[in-house]
Amino acid sequence: MIFRSLVAPLSVAMTFSLTNISFAQQGSASALFDMMKLGKIISVMREEGLAYGASLGGEMMPGRNIPEWPSEVARVYDHDKMIDGMRDSFVATLGERDMGPLVAFFASDLGQDIVELEYSARVAFLDEAIEEGAIAQYQTREAEDDPMLAAVKSFVATNDYVEANVAGALNSNFAFYTGMIDGGALSSRMSESDILADVWAQEPEIRANTQEWLYSYLLMAYQPLGVEGLDAYEQIMATAEGRAMNAALFESFDQMYVAISRELGQSVAGYMLAEEL
């Protein structure tokens, strides 16, 4: 259930009792959304977005004091809109598919431990010092051929996390470009092939950063589970239901971030043009 938006600036620039869950709820995508506490994860993603938006403003509009920029970024990263849109997309993508096995897993003690560990680590990563420390720890354990890191890599491969995150970041970058063009800040003569060329030029760096972030974050999050606990999680995610849920998550996160990135590009363009005037 991990998604990290790696939108880059332009180069030109849980314990529940199963007895309390009805059979109908067990097959519900909406119940699964709640059981995984995705709203809490999205809230952290919003905090990441606000920090990214602040740095983006400084990079794209250097030397300018724009008091209203933080509120504009907050408007783009609207909390309720992000959660409601994500839920609607997730539920619509899964449709009437029976997700009972996943609901049961995330209702278990292990499932709720996983939910809380992922959330806690994501919150911790809001602190750059903690994130840097986790990256250093990953690099050290990479050199030691660590069994827990090997389990994390297997889990990442099973869920295709690297490719899904890289694709999401590229889509978001493309949307940011188109937002800038729609806002009039880039030449209208810039073709789609030009945009794609610039976006693809960022792919190697995005891939390297994605792998480093994923392994560092998941190693920190899942350490308390141990290899055995993570293997159990990997097994449920390798089922047909697990793969369907993963696909729905990435489709929904991708839609959310593409919309945000395009709107953010339009906002940046608007402020850049205002400066020119």
Image (cartoon, grey):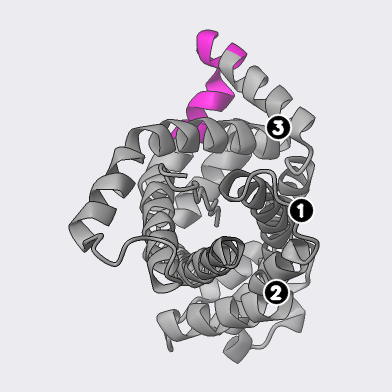
Identity of the amino acid at label 1?
Answer: Asn
**Label drawn at residue 75:** 2
Residue 38 lies, with reference to residue 57, above or below; the image says below
Give the residue type at disc 2. Answer: Arg
Compute the Cα span from label 3 to label 2: 27 Å
Give the secondary structure at mark 1. Answer: loop
Secondary structure of the residue carrying tag 2 is helix
Task: Give the left or right position of residue 184, taking residue 277 as reference.
Answer: left
Residue flagged by tag 3: what amino acid is it?
Glu
Q: Is residue 257 above or below residue 98?
A: above
Q: Is residue 26 visible?
A: no
Question: In terms of depth relative to the viewer, which is nearer, 95 or 230?
Answer: 95
Task: Choose the circle earlier in sequence order: 1 or 2.
Answer: 1
From mark 3 to mark 1, how far is it between C-alphas?
A: 29 Å
Mark nearer the viewer, 3 or 1? 1
On screen, residue 246 versus residue 5, left or right, reads left
Segment tinted magenta in the rendering: 140-153
Q: Which residue is mark 3?
A: 131
Q: Choose between 233 and 261: the one closer to the eye.
A: 261
Instruction: Looking at this view, name the residue that lies furthest to the front.
Output: 277
